[in-house]
Amino acid sequence: MREPSETPEPDFDINADRLREECGVFGIYGHPDAAAITALGLHALQHRGQEAAGIVSYDGKRFHSERRLGLVGDTFTRREIIDRLPGTMAIGHVRYSTTGETVLRNVQPLFAELNSGGFAISHNGNLTNGLSLRRQLVGEGAMMQSTTDTEVILHLVARARRGRFIDKFIDGLRHLEGAYAFVGLTNKKLIGARDPLGIRPLVQGRLDGCPILASETCALDIIGAQHVRDIDNGEVVVFDEEGAQTLRPFPPMPARPCIFEYIYFARPDSMVGGKSVYQIRKTMGQELAREAPASVDVVVPVPDSGVPAAIGYAQASGIPYELGIIRNHYVGRTFIQPTQSIRELGVRLKHNANRAAVAGRRIVLVDDSLVRGTTSVKIVRMMREAGAREVHFRIASPPITHPDYYGIDTPERDKLLAANLDIDGMRRFIGADSLAFLSVDGVYRAMGEERRDPARPQFTDHCFTGDYPTPLADRATETAQPRQLSLLAEAV
């Protein structure tokens, strides 16, 4: 087995070695405070993307757009910004990019004036044939204004030879492969669409009788809206002055939602697919305790994402739960550290060991996932320096052995610890006394499902199994021309 080549960086951030979601979407139709409500919805979805945010509104005569780098609160809490977004219809977006620099031209919602009128769109997900479509469109004379794969849908809609706008939009969808949850806005309609497998989530809500679309139910909760239902896989919904319309343009197929929404991405207070994310994460911890018990004195969560699973592990094992790592929520980007000694002091600005909870004890650390392993090295070291007698590690998901191409920022396979080392090799790399993962079957049990047939999974679980649910058309292009891919196929 090959040892990973990277060494732990001196600066320590527990979240530095996390998988990243790419974005969140929100839209509302017919409300006098559409932009302000959209801003609040985006606040609730901030965990899905922290690099940029944007809102487009329509006031009955013209579209208005405000797009900014940074957090939602950096811009959209200011009254003067919301006042620039008049109208009763609005859509919004929070963004995290997987490659390339985040620049303003890539910030969504994207907007274009088409032959049928203005059209704005927000996208959560990643198109696995986005580069191929982009090359084809550019070869036919299209002029691209961004480096995001989302822009191809604007061009496909513009070129569709149909009369009604919604038919043009559906024509554009038929060319796409991969994962998407779209929220679009015209001068008359709010539109939502979910990919045929339902890989990325999209929910419908209602506030004061006005329809809402959002990535998660937590965005509905923050504004006091009612959760109506989840948009189905392969479904297109349209809201306008005539009411609501549901279209199902694709052949029916079983849904395969992304398993990582439940393991990590969705907020714990959200409902995804009718299931409580918090309860599922607790149940994953309970399953982990049954599959991989540890002879220890205390259960310690890795904050914050490991907390629900650690609670479940403690409940199922009967071992006391303790906060062995304390997170400082009020530290942003740390100052430039000029010397090694100052750097080492800066380690404790964001996370520090709770010595009283771990000193002299055998502890089991519970986390939701293990990616490169570099952060786990530092966590184990921190616990030992705080006096822990033994440090065991338990992961409430299976080993991540394959990268994702559907809207999760995963490293390439040679950077994934589990793709290069066996369990004992990983244990030695992070310095733990023992290491164990929840099985794929254990994840399914926590979801309230039996894994009926590994050849026909109920979820998009390829990061653990290598079973990609759609063709990966752009992968051959990436292998042949990696530089061009990095320049042209920046994910949403």
Image: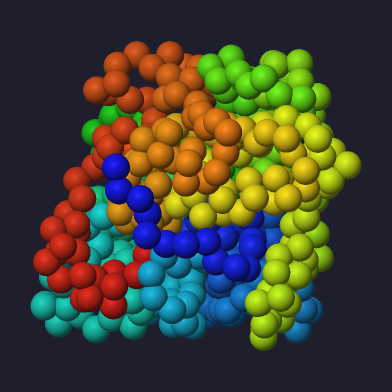
Determine whether, in the image, residue 186 is placed left or right of residue 300: left
Q: How is the image coloured?
A: rainbow
Q: Position of residue 393 (x, y in %)?
A: 59, 35
Q: Find residue 67 and report its image quarter.
A: bottom right
> Is 327 located above or below residue 484 in the figure?
above
Q: Find residue 398 and report its image quarter.
A: top left
The quadrant the N terminus occupies is top left
Can residue 22 be seen from the camera position used here?
yes
Determine whether, in the image, residue 318 is placed left or right of residue 275: right
> Is 486 located above or below residue 103 in the figure?
above
Determine whether, in the image, residue 31 is placed left or right of residue 255: right
Q: Find residue 464 and report its image quarter.
A: top left
Q: Position of residue 256 (x, y in %)?
A: 37, 33
The residue at 71%/65% (across/down) is: 347
How many numbered discs, if any? 0
Q: Position of residue 400 (x, y in %)?
A: 40, 41
- Pick the residue in front: 32 or 41: 41
Q: Position of residue 264 (x, y in %)?
A: 56, 42
The quadrant the C terminus occupies is bottom left
Determine whether, in the image, residue 117 is placed left or right of residue 302: left
Farthest residue, direction right:
356
The residue at 32%/66% (across/down) is: 149
- Pick the residue in front: 293 or 165: 293
> Is 306 located above or below residue 164 in the figure?
above
> Is 305 located above or below residue 321 in the figure?
below
Can residue 159 be seen from the camera position used here?
no
The residue at 32%/45% (across/down) is: 420
The residue at 28%/30% (across/down) is: 252
